[in-house]
Image (cartoon, grey):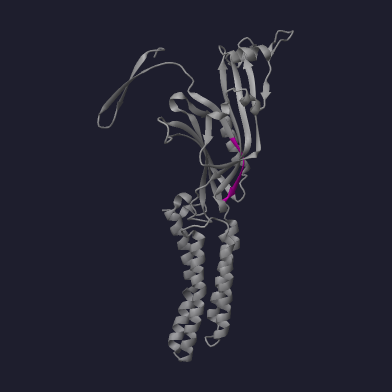
Amino acid sequence: FEDDENVKIIFENKNLQREEITLKKFKRDLIEPFSDFYIRSLKIDEDNNLIEARILIEASHSFADDDPMYELAKELLWISNDDGNDDTEACNFEASDWDKALFANPGGGFEFDNLHSSNFDTFQNGIYLKPYSQEIGWHKDLGWENELYIEYFEDGIHFFNTDFKYHNFPFDKQTISFKIINQHEMPDGILGISDYTKKYLLDLVKQNKITGWNIIDNRIVYDHYKSPIHENYTSTVSLELDIERKSGYYLYKVILPIIIILIVCWSSIWIAPKELESKLTIAIVCLLSLIAYNFVTDNDIPKLDYLTTIDWIILSSYFYAALPNILGIYFYTLFKKRKFVQLNKYESIAKRYGLLSYLAIVFSIILLNVSINYENASTMFSWMTG
């Protein structure tokens, strides 16, 4: 299509209903503002539902050669060399001085979504500008137009709210997202980022800097957002990370010791029924030890109104730790009443199926939680999902 030509666009749905609109073609810059943001480090505070992230933001825009700003910059920042290879030099400003002069700040074109707060004591920022000209050989060779390039950078710590799903804790997988929302409505420009953002994202994944988590996937997502007070949609860009909890700590230092405690507890079944005091001593001590493990994981995640995988395991462990007490008293009663046939029968069942049924229930708990909440299941158990 030629410039300024009217173009008829026809939309047709599955029911063959047609809708027509006519648009005029013209050339313009689609991306406004052009920006990058890099995640330097991450720290997850699950107890307070927060993510602490150090983020470097770079945003830029340009003044065309018919703008007085370009002419002024070209005049003051031009470098004349005797060999004829002229060039322009860059200039750095304090961001506060730039704002006081009432110049447009390219960093003011977007905002973070789901932001809790920012620690401005950690912030460093500034303005970088450089004029480019077709009169300079290497500028022309690189395809630079006659323009004044202005870049804003900002490096600081932000805190974001989280909405983790803990049903599979401690064998869970979560997705964290850092979304920036364009403050320009879509008719005025779409927020865009360069390949440098993706390169830094891949480097973050490679270094795996999140304590207690593994980064297993990453992506950049372009989307749109409708503010309740604006008429038009605006564009968004999100950096998303899929992270998986390092569950070795809970597996080896919580779940395995609980199983060992249950084995010791059920060993009281093999004590003679008449030794009731010895049976109860072992069972009660094991039950108290089990209660102590409940406090190991209690402070690792927020207070929830539902049970996680490890909560179900601990809850079932309470039941199986209390059961030898009940069985010990019952077997002692049968022994006192000299009902040896029933005593031998029930003792044999308890010895054969007691611990096996507990292990089967633990496996079933993990299987059921993973199947119901498969999207948040770690790769360790995702093979169980139907």
| Image coords of residue 210 (percent x, y) | 61, 46
Location of residue 9 with respect to 58 vertically, above or below: above
Q: Does the magenta stretch include residue 42?
A: yes
Which image quadrant is residue 301 in?
Answer: bottom right
Residue 366: give x, y in percent of width and height: 47, 59
Identify the residue shown where x is 49% and y is 20%: 29
Point 57% across, 29% down: residue: 107
Q: Give the range drawn in magenta.
A: 38-45
Q: Where is residue 273 in the image (x, y as percent from the top left)?
A: 52, 86
Image quarter of the N terminus: top left
What residue is shown at x 63% (from left), y 16% (from top)? 131
Residue 260 visible within the image: no
Q: Is residue 299 magenta?
A: no
Residue under the image location 48 percent in, 74 percent down: 354
Depth order, front residue of 127/224: 127
Q: Which of 329 and 297 is in front in this view?
A: 297
Number of marks: 0
Q: Magenta span: helix, strand or loop, mainly?
A: strand
* Percent x, y of residue 377: 49, 52
Residue 339 to residue 44: above or below: below
Q: Tell which residue pokes out farthest to the right in this image.
A: 82
Direction from residue 362 to residue 72 in the image, left or right: right
Residue 385 in view, yes or no: yes
User: Would residue 78 appear left or right of 289 to someone viewing this image?
Assistant: right
Compare residues 223 and 143 and report the one nearer the observer: 223
When the figure is inspected, residue 115 is found, relative to residue 386, above or below; the finding is above
